[in-house]
Image: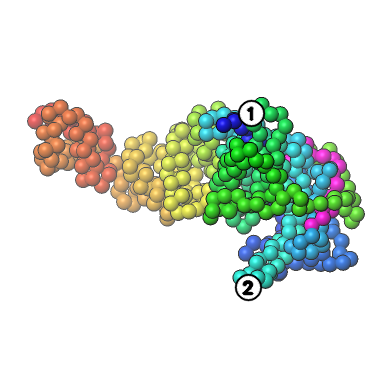
Amino acid sequence: MAEYIATIGLEIHAHIKTASKMFDGCAAAYAGAEPNTFVSVVSLGLPGSLPVVNQRAVELAARSGLALNCTVNERSVFSRKSYPYPDLPKGYQISQYDEPLCSDGWVEIRTAAGEVRRIGIERLHIEEDTGRLVHAADDSSLIDYNRSGVPLMEIVSRPDLRTPEEARLYFEKIRQLLVWIDVNSGNLEDGALRCDANVSVRPAGQERYGAKVEVKNINSFRFVERAVAYEIQRQIRVLDGGGVVEQETRGWDELRGETVGQRTKEFAHDYRYFPEPDIPPLVLSAAWIAERRAELPELPDARRARFEAVYGLSAQDADLLTSERPIADYYEAAVAAAQAVGGSAKDVANWVLNEGFRLLKERGESAAQLAERMPPAHVATLIELVARGSINRGVARQLFEESFNSGAEPGRLVAERGLTQISDSDALVAVAREVIAANPKVVAEYRGGKVTAIQFLVGQMMRATRGQANPQVARALLEAELGSL
Ligand code: MN
C-alpha cells in the first residue's frame, strides 16, 4: 500500500459582533429571535434599496486581520457573488473577491506532541450572511431572514494543515483569538462560527495536489477533526482501489460518522463575480490602520510567554491561564492582591487552576463569572490565612468553595465559625491519645514497621477536630506518643 500525504485548508466563517447588519441599520440580533422580526428593505433585497457599509464591521474585521498577522490593505473592493437560492433574496451575496480587506497572515498552533506549527492565512474578507431555510416535515420550506445581511468575515487558511488534529487546533486557535479581541461571540451552536474543510490526498513523492474535496458547514471542533479524518481515509481507500477522487462538495453526517456527497464539479457554482456597483472601493488610510493596531490587546501567545517568564509558570499552566482573556485578567488581578500580602504567583495559579476551574466546570459557568463569584481579594485572603498558619489547606479549600458559592469573605467565615487552626500541643495531645486508644490495629501496624500507617491516624485527628488541627503538629504529637508507649 502506498504512503499518502494529506493536505488540509480551512475556510472559517465568523460573525462580526456588531449591533447592526453589514449593509444597513437593521439590528443583527438574529439568535433566538422570532423569525423575520429583524428585516429591512436592504436585507430583504427589495428593488431600489441601497447598501451602506457598516463602519464598525470594517473596524472589527481589520482588528481581526491584525490579530492574525495579516496585512490590512489600504484598498479593498466589494463584489457581487452570484447566489441563486432563496436564503439570499437579492440572488447574489455581497462579498470581496480579488481585493480582500486583509491578506497574508499566520497563526501558530501547538500539537499534543509539543510541535509548534505556523499556519498561513491567505486572506480575510468581509461579506454578508444568508438567511436560514427550515425544511418542514410536509416537504414545504420556511425561510427566516433575520440572519440575512449579518456581517461575516471569511478567513481562508493556506493548505498548511497536515492532520485532523491540526485542523481542530487551528479552528480552536481562531476562535480563541476572535473571542479574545471581542469581535465574535465564539458561539458555535448558534452558527456564529463555522468552517468548511478542504481535504486532498496524494501519494508521497507526488508534487501535484490531489483532487480537492470540500466538506461544508462544520460547527464543532470535534466534528472538524472527525470529518477530516474520515475524508482522508475515504480518499486513500479510493486511490488504493485504483479509483479517482472526484472534486466535489460533501457534508458531514455526525450520526453516521461519515461525509456524504452533495455536489460534484459538474454542478459547481459559477459565481460570476463582478465589482459591486453600489459600493465604492473601500479606501483606508495608514493612520486609520495604525489606530486599529493600537486597539489590539496583548494577544494570547504573548501573554502565555509573559506568564511563563514573569510568574515562573510551567508552559501547561500558562497555557490554561491564558485560554480565555477573563481568566488571564482574573489571574493577574489575584496575583497583584496576593503579592501585596506576601503570597506568590504560583500559589495563585494553583488555587485558580484547581479550585477555580473545578467549581466553574461543576456549575457549568463561564470564565467571565469567576471574578464575580470569587473576587481576587478573597483568593489573596485565603493564601494569607494559610501562610500565617491560621488555617490549614483543607479548611482553605472548603472556604474557597463556600466563598465561591455565597460570596462571603473568607476571613469573616474563619472568625464566625472559629475555624482557626489548632496548633497548640496542649490542646491536641488529648486528641492524639484518644485516636491511639481507639485504633489499636493501626497502631500495631505502625509498630510493626508500616510507617505510612501514621497517615491514617493524622486523618483521624483532623476528623476529630473538624479539620482544624495543624497536620504537622498532629503528626509530631502522634510520633512522640507512639514512641513513648
Ligand atoms: Mn463565504
**What is the secondary structure assignment of the residue under circle 2?**
loop
Quarter occupied by residue 120: top right
Q: Which residues are magenta?
A: 64-83
Residue 77 belongs to the span the image colors magenta? yes
Image coords of residue 455 (percent x, y): 23, 35
Would residue 291 be visible to someone looking at this image? no
Q: Residue furthest bottom?
A: 138
Instruction: Decide: few, some or many residues near mark 1? Use Cα within 10 Å; few <14, some 14-19, many ≥20.
Output: few
The residue lying furthest to the front in this view is 242
On the image, the x and y values in percent for residue 123 come to 75, 40
| Rendered image: mark on residue 138 | 2
**Spatial CA span between label 1 and label 2:** 50 Å
Up the image or down, 477 lies above or below 135; here it is above
From the viewer's perspective, is residue 412 above or below residue 67? below
Query: Which residue: 82% across, 46% down?
Result: 97
Q: Is residue 256 visible?
A: yes
